[in-house]
Image: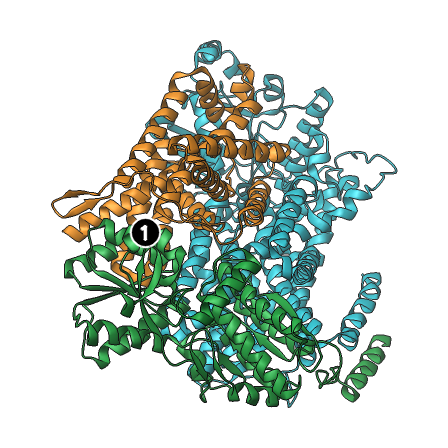
Chain colours: A green, B orange, C cyan
Amino acid sequence: MRLTIVAVVLAALTACAPPGENSGSSGEATGPIKIANVNAQSGQLSSLGKWENKGVKLAVDEANKAGGVNGRQLQLDLFDDQGDPTVGTNLARKISSDGYVAMLGTAESAVTLAMAPILKDAKIPNITSGQSPKLAELKSPFLFLNAPTSVTFDETLAKYLVDEKGYQKIALISNNGAYGSGEHDAFSKSLKARNVTPVADEVVTPEQKDFNSNLAKIRQQNPDVLFIGAEEVQSGLIAKQARELGLKAIFAGGAPMGTDVYATTAGLANAEGSVVSSPYLSNEASPAIKEFAAKYKAAYGEDARLHVAKAYDGASILIEALKKTGGKGGQELADAIRGVKRDGLLGQYNYDEFGVGIHETKIGLIKQGQAVPATAS
Amino acid sequence: MQVFLQTLIGGITFGAVYALVAMGFSIVYRTMGLVNFAHGSVVMIGAYAASTFYMASKVPFAVAIVVAIVVTGLIGLIIERFLRPLENKDFTLMLIGTIGFGAVLEALAILIWGATGHAVPSPVATEPLNLGGVRIPTYSLLVIGVAALATTMLAFFLRRTKLGAAMQAVAMDHEAATACGIHVGRSNAMAFGIGACLAAVAGSLIGPMLYVNPTMGGTLGIKGFAAAMLGGFGSMPGAIVGGIAFGLLDAFAAGNFQAYSELVTFVVFALAVMIRPTGIFGEATVNRA
Amino acid sequence: MRRRLLLLAPIAVAAWLLPYGLGGYTMHVVDVAVIFAVLAIGLGLTMGVAGQINLAQVAFFGIGAYTVAILTSRTGLGFWPAAVLAILASIAAGLLVGIPALRMQSHYLGIVTLGLALGFINWVTNAGIAGRAEGISDIPVPPLFGIDLSSGYLYYYLELAVFALVLVFALFVTRSPLGRRLRAMRDDDLAAGALGAEIPLLRMTAFVLSGLYGGVAGVLYAGLIRFVAPETFNIGNMFLLLAMVIIGGRASIVGCVIGALGLAFVREALLDVSAFAQLGYGIVVVLVVVFFPKGLAGLPAQVFRRKTGERPRLSPFVPYDEVPPADARSVLEIDQVTKRFKGLVALQDVSLSVPARQIRGIVGPNGSGKTTLFNVISGFYTATAGRVRLDGASVGGLAPYRLSLKGVARTFQNLRLFEDLTVRDNILVALDRTRTSWIWRYLALPWAVSRYERSLRGRADEVLHRFGLTEFADAIPRSLPYGIQRRVEIARAMASLPSLLLLDEPAAGLNGDEVGRLAEIVRSIRDSGVTVVVIEHNMGLVMSLCDHVTVLSGGRVIADGPPDEVAVDPRVVEAYLGDSMAAPTEREAEHEHADR
């Protein structure tokens, strides 16, 4: 009986005032401007996450040294999504309830995709390092990419391989992870548009290590080009095993193949001559890039790379937009980001309605483990 | 045909590694009836120890393997010492205890070497052998050779030495062995040590084949364990046959079922184990009454 | 019970008021933690209570969440119908993954379930319908009478209601005859089978429960996060779940909940230093396993060991009412039974017939096939050739539980009491004579189950009283002297109201007084109308107790007759003298097989 009374009272209480939070806590105009950086710091792809974070930090530190935004300092907080979309959704909620004006990251499209709806509801702009075409398909007004999507990467690659070099016998090997399947679909589409049918199309799992059977099948077709759609390490393993099998084809792929991880995993000799499509080929491509690479090396004692550069670009764009809004977030900030026209390290940023800012990549060739622009060779 | 043979080569090479991992599982299991789920992580530590030393000091690869053996051997002894109070008590608890150790080793690897991992240059840099279009990488031959050598040495140790005979006795009958004056505890520690050494050999060999990172132990552990079961848990010939069988299963599934290979591999494995739970060679174990 | 309820009330009120003090994000963390708690309960039931090492729990979770996601986003089905189908799908998956459990146990089962879980992740990463690696992101907000469940605060109340329901159900199951049987199966599946527990069905039941809880958690997850991707259901999370259950205490449902909630919050607190967090869990799991095997739930008992005031004493046995003899029909008839193990002949053309109300002694040197004969009679082994008849009906090849239901009870040479169950629970396992198919009542008629349980408890008290064990009712068998354990085993066998009782060396390890009391008990059992077959080495006891003796040697019957005649039979004398020459292989063979 007593219990019933308690229950009734409680029910009444709940009915009157359902628990909740007062929204609109992010509007303060004093104190530091809070920016969240979400990236995997643990798990398989944590190397990407660590590079991204260093790039972002470099840009924010520079801005703070130069006096911040409207006299307010920028506060950069790092969150570890562990490469897990569920953790990502948790973090999205955390970011939205803790008064962050914007989020930078993540390097994994699947995590960004999971976070996007929550950030959109909370009106928090997100500049991601993901490059899955699905990010653009969302058409979220609060989601921006700091790099081209796989479509651009692979269209450029197809243009070079088919239109310029005239290769027709092209084989595909890709994994079924978020990155690999995105690459597979984008490159297949570009080939189809050119009326080229791949001579082989092998799909592997991201965990797979032995590609003998897949590569032996590809070898039977004797292709001119082998397109590899996989992350750095797996691309390297595929390249290594392909050469061991006597496959003579030229390797081609996206940004992962421009990294030293790919080159060392494959072995320098095996990686030699690989064709890579990337908006950021080397640390010597232009005076601006040279300057950036030198700053980075001075700050962290290691060489800069694509992931660092695009994170730096993304953060710089955010800072520029924040200066325009005077530190305000929400819709205003999103509009400001869309309006930024910036000559970045990766190229000319010019955002479209899909949130994509860069619309072209360059072709590079791997020489001694380093990517060099194809035109220069 | 060429595709078939090439798949075979790949399957056998990886199978040899699985066999080494499976032997590590089996020797611990037959001696003390314990399934060491941390074994995969010990392999990973072995891979790190060997590759780090090899790349930093430029010594011959064989020396690096020895260093790795010492490191993992110590880890094996530590794990055994910790779990000793549970020996012959609660099987499930010990199983979970070793899972805990696996997590600890993985976390330590991340803290020591970072989460990124590194590639290891191949210690033999010669052209692959070409047999009528089927190419066999020389490193694969090295892997198979070292695996065979390790197996032979282990067999010799178990059959022909006093310590080995004592371990065999413990494996057959715990109590009778104690009655004969055999120190069971020492035998157990020994088994754990040998298991860890095998892990180091496996890990060292995998390094140049693949890429060394903290999470590599998980898959290797699960596949090595499955291989041991396929062959007959606790049986040494079973571990070898099971390892190769699992390597082949993996390789052919990848060729024929593409990205669905993992699903196919594990479903086939589950069916095989259901048809014959004791594996190809039957389970050889201590009697847990 | 009433005090328990009063204790529960403040917890319930606190849980109800909790959201009022939390920020939005913390609320979300609590919501996720509750889902893990539901999963942990499921794993606790399968692993802790039923002893099935199930590493596919996270896959059941995934199947629940994915089914909701696929049905709502691809077919436009409403959230709740999809939820019902999702739970059914998880249960179906539970049944499928449970099939291997019929053939294998412990680590074998562990790796097979783990492999199947990996297979599931592989499937969702590939299948277009499951959204591949990017997952499915447009799951609708579950509608509920106009309440906006997209708010983490209001969703919490939905979760709380579901959680309370599944928690109560889990507690109800563990404290009922089914839960007792599951625990008995965990401790000793052979003995449980011999007491009428249908082991295969019980194992499937454990996996169905696992699937049910996984499915419920999956539905809650889908409604809360409204996004599914393969990464969430990976092996790392399976091990986290395992750590929750182990740290909390796997055999205690409340322990599992505490472990799950605790670890979920710790994980959240250490999110930014996840390598250290992992190191932490690992170390804690190892420490718990070594020092607190019962987890947090077992901690209070370990710290405050209850001081026993008075030492419990064994009371005298209360004899059964004598039943006047009926016709002298033959209860057990063994006809030309042969049993071979891989070329080794353990029994060769053994025939014997035991009339009602007889105490039949089976004697013979070590390795003569006595226990093998018992194993054939009680259904552990199937005879290679020959027939076993019970009350005239052939029972060859029947499973032990069927024989138990037909009135065969046995004890074991090396005591097979359920070690983590109290003496009373040991007796209760045997008293429960229902078939496992009876368990539909747990969902449909829970009050009928409670009534049945009360009647069982009343009868357990009677049995305990008869065997003088009342003061030991709440003791754990392991803690009791050997002689008392033997008596518990006989009481347990008699609790199943058998018509045929098989005693395997009941006097082994007993002192003179105890042997005398044993003889008294066995005679009273016979006088109550039960036929007794006893294997015994103590020749004094055999001579005084048995009405008739059968002598086995080398797997054959070499003599059969009244004790005094058999004792002087020259073949028997020779067999016993030659005992030391007999190969001891059979005992080992039996051992090995009995352990499977």
Mark 1 Cα within 10 Å, few/some/many (few <14, many 20+)?
many
Residue C570 lies, in percent from the top left, at: 45, 10
**Residue C111 can be seen, yes or no:** yes
Mark 1, chain letter? A
Q: Quadrant of residue B65?
A: top left
| Residue B289 in view here | no
**What's under tag 1, amino acid-wise?**
Leu
Residue under the image location 80 percent in, 70 percent down? C14
Q: Nearer the viewer, residue A28 or C471?
A: A28
B171 left or right of C432? left
Residue C255, percent from left and from top: 70, 55
Q: Measured along the vertical axis of the image, is residue C99 above or below residue C500?
A: below
Q: Is the residue C189 above or below the residue C526 in the image? A: below
Q: Residue at x 57, y 65 (%)?
A: C213
Q: Nearer the viewer, residue C310 or A234?
A: A234
Query: As drawn, is B277 to the left or to the right of B113?
Result: left
Relative side of A62 to B113, left or right: right
The residue beneath circle 1 is A268
Quarter occupied by the N terminus of chain A: bottom right
Instruction: Tell me where residue A132 sits by quadrant.
Output: bottom left
Using the image, determine if residue C243 lies above or below residue B282: below
Between C8 and A354, the residue placed more toward the observer is A354
